[in-house]
Amino acid sequence: MVTFKFIHHACFMLEHENNAIIFDPYLDGNPMGVKAEDIHVSHVLVTHNHGDHLGSAYEIAKNNNAVFISTAEVAGAAAVAGCKTHSMHLGGTHAFPFGKVRVTPAFHGSGIAGGHACGFIVNYYGVTVYFAGDTCVFSDMALLAKLEHIDYAVLPIGDNFTMGPQDAKVAVELLGVKKIIPVHYNTWPLIAQDPEKFKTEVEADGQTKVFVVDPGDSLELL
């Protein structure tokens, strides 16, 4: 059984039995008061170096002797900070003990010189999750669905810094994924959105399911 545990903003964990990995571990202001020392993971995946995504990644990685996975530039900075790292880049795949990681494009600032923001398609103990990261919608999302069979897509809907709900609906169509988890909304007034409205509009096709997961809640991925 694989569990999606939402912390807040774009930070979530995938858990399976005694293993867990974390994505974009921005913990500041999370409503449960989760701190870096509360996180126990084997791998830390970071899409880009903006503070609301890098967050507590260094501390979590070093606390757990976990592997920090990101693009070469972001992972390089983490290595300088004393983390154990695995550098990747756009289009690359690599096998890990939990499964496989593919690094995907994301159209957004990298937050670091010479870098590129990214997303991840992660096969985690047999469940494949696409985390788009911070991005606009782009037509090559349709290509991602040809490269990997994606079970769940984790998409930003906050607008302003990323795609908003209407563009995210187009992303759902391009991906052809039938199970969607929205993130990166309502952290601040500037990215306030109604996820239930997004859910209603996307599910109008009668085939797609949108899972609105509140901060602190979990979803079993089937």
Image (tube, rainbow, N blue to C red):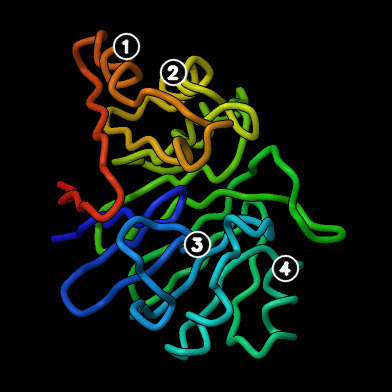
| 14 relative to 163, above or below | below
At 40% from the left and 41% from the top, the residue drawn is 154
Q: Which numbered marker is on residue 201?
A: 1
Look at the numbered disc 3 and give the secondary structure of its residue. loop
Determine the image quadrant of residue 162: top right
Circle 2: element type:
helix
For this rendering, which residue is in front, 156 or 95? 156
Residue 38's place in the image compared with 171, above or below, is: below
Q: Which circle's residue, 2 or 3, is located before the other in the chain? A: 3
- Rounded to the nearest angstrom, the CA distance separating label 4 from label 2 is 31 Å
Name the residue rendered at 30%, 72% in the picture.
20
Tell me the CA gap for discs 4 and 1: 38 Å
Q: Nearer the viewer, mark 4 or mark 1?
A: 1
Instruction: Name the mark on residue 72.
Output: 4
Q: Amino acid at mark 1?
A: Glu
Cα distance in 3D space between marks 1 and 2: 8 Å
Q: Tell whether label 1 touches label 4 (CB within 8 Å).
A: no
Report if the CB atoms under discs 1 and 2 are less than 8 Å apart.
yes
Determine which residue is flagged by label 2: 169
Numbered label attached to residue 28: 3
The Cα atoms of the two marked residues, 1 and 3, are separated by 31 Å
**Residue 91: image location, x then y, percent:** 63, 51
> Dot 4: within a 10 Å radius of its alpha carbon, few (fewer than 14), some, or many (20 or more) residues?
some
Q: Position of residue 101 (x, y in %)?
A: 47, 61
